[in-house]
């Protein structure tokens, strides 16, 4: 991981054209050649970037590459009186070319491999340029994903009703497995679809499962249950209209119920 703090500008060309004027920013160059540009403000999202797969070229421009160093010449203003005598001289330095641009320290040209997109970053002044070996990252471990909710509900199946019993997780149907198949206290099969945040799409998915499961005479009648940590009002209305029960899952409570270790609170 290479991190550069520098005064820089950037131009992105391709499917979308965008530019960043000169300012002090942080450049992050990863091992996969991707380059990201960050500012002081904002959260995790960079101002601009080129993601892998891509190739990066680092160029050190020299005079004559279309950019010239700002140079100056000395001009002398002479005042002459009516008799032709010199009465004053004033020396001043002025730019040879007011539009001249200083030669940048570096230019990064990053080209996408799967398109014609190019990100060109012009670095005018470098304050810091450091490289770090971060090693292999184990990856993000998520807590409270659907698989965890499914696991804990299967372990605590009586949350759907007293006397309920688990048939199995990932019960197969012709259009994919329903998360949990159970039998309630009355001996009726219950197909349970689990989501972290329940929306209309989840209700539609449960509808397909229940319709197909009810065609099996060994299972029918099968009722549906829509379980999630949160359920949108629209999804709740649709589920009720379809005859499904809605169940709110408290993940922290479910974890506590499953954990037999001593807890202070």
Image: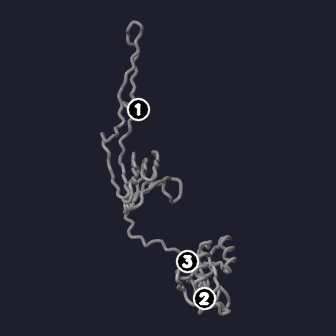
Q: Mark 2 touching mark 3, by CB under 8 A?
A: no
Please state if 25 lies on the left or on the right of 192 as rendered: left
Q: Mark 1 touching mark 2, by CB under 8 A?
A: no
Q: CA distance from mark 2 to mark 3?
A: 17 Å
Q: Which mark is residue 182?
A: 2
Q: Secondary structure at mark 2?
A: strand
Q: Is label 1 or label 2 in front?
A: 2
Q: Secondary structure at mark 1?
A: loop
Q: Quadrant of the N terminus?
A: bottom left
Measured from the top left, where is residue 91 in percent x and y? 39, 23
**In this orientation, does residue 260 appear?**
no
For disc 1, the marked residue is 98
Q: CA distance from mark 1 to mark 2?
A: 80 Å
- Which residue shows up at 46% across the image and 45% down it? 21
Q: Quadrant of residue 136?
A: bottom left
Measured from the top left, where is residue 202 in percent x and y? 60, 75
For disc 3, the marked residue is 146
- Above or below for 52 versus 247: above
38, 229: nearer the viewer: 229
Measured from the top left, where is residue 198 in percent x and y? 62, 73
**In this orientation, does residue 230 appear?**
yes
Sequence-earlier tag: 2 or 3: 3
């Amino acid at each position: 991981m290479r991190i550069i703090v520098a005064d820089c500008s950037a131009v992105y060309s391709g499917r979308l054209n965008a530019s960043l004027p000169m300012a002090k920013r942080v450049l992050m160059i990863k091992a996969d050649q991707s380059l990201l540009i960050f500012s002081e403000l904002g959260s995790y999202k960079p101002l601009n970037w080129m993601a892998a797969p891509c190739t990066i070229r680092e160029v050190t421009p020299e005079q004559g590459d279309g950019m010239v160093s700002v140079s100056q010449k000395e001009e002398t203003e002479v005042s002459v009186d009516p008799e032709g005598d010199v009465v004053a001289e004033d020396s001043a330095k002025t730019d040879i070319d007011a539009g001249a641009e200083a030669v940048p320290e570096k230019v990064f040209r990053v080209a996408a491999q799967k398109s014609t997109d190019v990100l060109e970053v012009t670095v005018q002044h470098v304050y810091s340029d450091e490289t770090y070996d971060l090693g292999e990252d184990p990856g993000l471990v998520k807590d409270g994903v659907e698989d965890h909710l499914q696991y804990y509900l299967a372990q605590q199946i009586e949350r759907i009703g007293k006397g309920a019993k688990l048939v199995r997780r990932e019960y197969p149907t012709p259009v994919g497995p329903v998360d949990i198949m159970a039998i309630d206290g009355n001996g009726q099969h219950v197909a349970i679809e689990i989501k972290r945040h329940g929306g209309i799409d989840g209700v539609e998915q449960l509808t397909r499962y229940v319709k197909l499961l009810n065609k099996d005479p060994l299972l029918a009648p099968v009722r549906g249950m829509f379980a999630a940590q949160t359920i949108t009002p629209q999804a709740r209305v649709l589920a009720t209209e379809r005859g499904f029960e809605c169940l709110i899952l408290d993940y922290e409570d479910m974890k506590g119920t499953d954990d037999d270790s001593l807890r202070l609170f």
